[in-house]
Image (cartoon, helix red, strand yellow):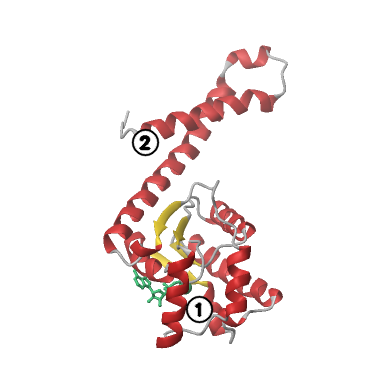
Amino acid sequence: MCGMSFSAKSTFAALLAPKLDAAVISLDAINEERGFHGGQGIPVEEWGRTSAIAHERARRALSGGCSVLIDDTGSPRFLRDAWRETAETHGGAFALVWVCISAELQHQRLLASRKTRDRHDVTDEVMAQHVAGFEEPLDENPIVVEAVDAASDARADEVASLIRADETLSESALFDEDQARIALAMDPRRAQRRRPRLLDVGPALVAGRRYSAYAVASGNSG
Ligand SMILES: Nc1ncnc2c1ncn2[C@@H]1O[C@H](COP(=O)(O)OP(=O)(O)O)[C@@H](O)[C@H]1O
Ligand SMILES: [Mg+2]
């Protein structure tokens, strides 16, 4: 997941995870285990350690065939890229859920939480830095959840369906990639060509991906 503090990521994660049979890995929870509180500001090297622990837990779960849901702000972007890589090397499919909140609602929730003290305070300074530095995943094809919908079980059902469809898509894309390689390797015209190998493989793989995307998106099993 990704989204700013108070967008309700943890609220949504708790609804979504059981629908995907996924274990929640919360960076905030790991920080707490280690005696750090995110809202007070955490030194960069400690964030690095927390992140390494989260990836290690995720790798273990993925290698054992379990899905994981990462509950974190997921910003800056390099953090999301790191999760993509962990998914690719140990699991396969990756989906990004972005919980979006307006500045106004975020401020309301921050003030409300200071009253009820339902979590450690996020200081104004930490919040301002966090908001200013947040890198939105605009070109990463995220599944977007509005903060006001994040406590909705029906919305979690929808998102779980989208993620499952994504998973099918990436599995069939991988399958097509293999098929494309085999088809190319067996193509007798190949031996007569003098162009470099990679040029031959590239366009066919793209064509294979497009085709599988179309087949799944249109619900056409043929
Ligand atoms: N739909 C909602 N309506 C009102 N308050 C909500 C809603 N969803 C979450 N909250 C409140 O907003 C705050 C932040 O939620 P949380 O899930 O902890 O966010 P995050 O994990 O993104 O920081 C919590 O105090 C929670 O009770
Ligand atoms: Mg949270």
Report whether the residue tagged 2 is closer than 8 Å to ligand 1. Answer: no
Instruction: Say if residue 51 shows up in the picture.
Output: no
Q: Quadrant of residue 30?
A: bottom right
In this figure, which residue is indicated by the disc labeled 1?
29
Instruction: Say if residue 100 shows up in the picture.
Output: yes
In the rendered image, residue 17, in percent from the top left (x then y), is placed at 37, 65
The reply, left or right, for residue 155 in relation to residue 87 is left
Given residues 49 and 112, the one toward you in this image is: 112
Vertical arrangement, residue 92 with respect to residue 213, above or below: below
Quadrant location of the C terminus in the rendered image: top left
The reply, left or right, for residue 206 in relation to residue 109 is right
Residue appearing at x 50%, y 71% in the figure: 5
Vertical arrangement, residue 85 with respect to residue 45, above or below: above
Cα distance, mark 1 to mark 2?
37 Å
Q: Given the current orientation, which residue lies at the most extreme left position?
A: 154
Q: Given the current orientation, which residue lies at the most extreme front position?
A: 104
- Whichever of labels 1 and 2 marks the residue nearer the N terminus, that label is 1
Residue appearing at x 67%, y 24% in the figure: 199
In the rendered image, residue 180, in percent from the top left (x then y), is placed at 53, 28
Ligand 1 located in image quadrant? bottom left
In the rendered image, residue 185, in percent from the top left (x then y), is placed at 59, 24
Helix or strand or loop: what does disc 2 sit on? helix
In this figure, which residue is indicated by the disc labeled 2?
216
Residue appearing at x 67%, y 12% in the figure: 192
